[in-house]
Image (tube, helix red, strand yellow):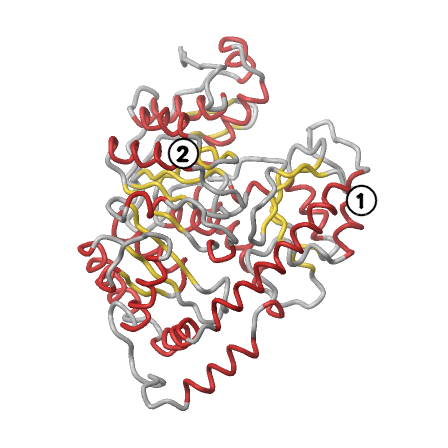
Amino acid sequence: MLQLSLDPDSALPLADQIVIGIRTRIEDRVLRPGMRLPPIRDFAERHTVSRYTVVEAYDRLVAMGYVRSRRGSGFYVEGRPAPAIGTAARGELAQTFDNAGLLHRSLDEGSDRLKVGLGWLPPEWHDEAGVRRHLRTLARQPRAKVTSYGSAQGYGPLREQLRVKLAESDIPASADQIVLTNGATHALDIVVRHLLKPGDCVFVDDPGSWNLFANLRLFGVNLVGVPRHVHGPDPATLAALLEEHHPKAFFTQSVLQNPTACDLAPANAFRILQLAEKHDFVVVEDDTYSDFHPGQPTRLATLDQLRRVIYVGSFSHTLSGNLRVGFLACQPDLAASFADVKIVTCLCTSEFAEQLVYQMLTEGHYRKYVERLRVRLLDATAKTLRMLERSGFTVFSEPAGGMFVWAKARGLHDAARLAGQAASEAIMLAPGHVFRPQMQPTPYLRFNVAYAQDPRLERFLDRAADRPESPSGDSEVAP
């Protein structure tokens, strides 16, 4: 008989407790392949939880590949075979390419689609004229590497300039501790390739970066979500999860986190670093959106001084998605290893693009441009918040800056159906389940404020606000 110890007063949701409990027993071979799990009704009555909670937990175990559902028979243990090198585990590959489908739609340049769910700014928000001007200036200079390869760690003067930039946030790093990459996604991929192997466990923000989740699944890594609250990852839940799991790394964002747009509180930051030290795991801090922040937010790399934190940054969201210039900052030995991985997997990055970014940083263009961009984003955010309030949405937390608002509609159980209805009207929304490690249902959506001023969005949301609830808890949108 399966009997789990569930704590209704825990900060960890009951569904998460059930998933962790059953998954642990499968991994420990207490529950063996082919064994039948208790029927949903019996489990719910025995553990005094709702049937919906059990359904959610079982469905997540199926998606993760631990359990198989047999129509009319029940749920059976599938086991957890070790994935082949470089492949995702059963049940996770489909989720990986579900997310890749979203990225395909994001990159589709169809002119009629309103892309409120995008993770980057519209091209017209960037200073294209400024980029072109600096591009022409650089192309005329003899030092510009137009046809030759770059170096292993990246353009030296830019790494030196990044040392200065990081020092402004009290993050100490020599130029030798910095490796330039093809954007933040490439930087994170290098970290995954070096630190992890298939079957390893990592902690991630829940909700968090869906393309990171897809990459981790593709590599066969097991994801465990740490609930994300207004002040960052919940330390109490993190501590509880560490009693069940032994992660190699915790991937998180401290500043203007994607998708919640919240900042990490100092007390939470200190506790996370204490737990990382106690349980010996690396913290990978993705600071992709921090240049949009108007203040001086808390960063884990500042508190840790790059002892246990690997810091990731990028200029793709601010300057240009086509430049693809990002970087890693870490301990010197790790930086050398990351440079080796970079050489093996892509040889080098574009030194011409790196020289262009260097020129825009050192001539003051970047700082002035980002200041203007912050003001514009704050204005768009204020307008988006008012629009969402008129449309019956509740905001998770009012952002301090950046391009995202994380909000839910009144009475909505799963935002995926709403996003599907919006797609039929050529509106691309970002439903919250794609930002969750196991793609669990959620009523939240991520709105990009740079696209949210289009009147088509408010008209659609106003119609959606009058939809009746379906018996399953999903929402019906009026045609």
- Horizontal arrangement in the rendering, residue 449 relative to residue 371 (left or right): right
Identify whether 137 is placed above or below 266. below
Q: Amino acid at mark 2?
A: Asn
Q: Residue furthest left?
A: 333
Counting residues from the start of the chain, the first of labels 1 and 2 encountered is 2
Q: Quadrant of residue 234?
A: top left
- Horizontal arrangement in the rendering, residue 462 relative to residue 72 (left or right): right
Q: Quadrant of residue 119?
A: bottom right
Badge 2 is on which residue?
Answer: 268
Q: Position of residue 200 (x, y in %)?
A: 29, 40
- Horizontal arrangement in the rendering, residue 430 relative to residue 421 (left or right): left
Q: Nearer the viewer, residue 447 or 248?
A: 447
Label placed on residue 462: 1
Q: Nearer the viewer, residue 201 or 151?
A: 151
- Horizontal arrangement in the rendering, residue 98 relative to residue 184 (left or right): right
| Residue at disc 1, secondary structure | helix
**Marks 1, 2: nearer the viewer:** 2
Label placed on residue 443: none
Q: Residue at the spot x=30%, y=50% of the render?
A: 310
Q: Quadrant of the N terminus?
A: top left
Q: Is disc 1 surrounded by few (<14), some (14 to 19) or many (20+) residues within 10 Å? A: some
Q: Nearer the viewer, residue 381 or 193?
A: 381
| Residue at disc 2, secondary structure | helix
Q: Amino acid at mark 1?
A: Asp
Q: Is disc 2 surrounded by few (<14), some (14 to 19) or many (20+) residues within 10 Å? A: some
Identify whether 356 is placed above or below 313. below
Q: Nearer the viewer, residue 79 or 132?
A: 132
Identify whether 248 is placed above or below 75. below
Answer yes or no: do the residues labelled 1 and 2 have beta carbons within 8 Å? no
Q: Position of residue 181 (x, y in %)?
A: 34, 64
Q: Position of residue 383 (x, y in %)?
A: 71, 51
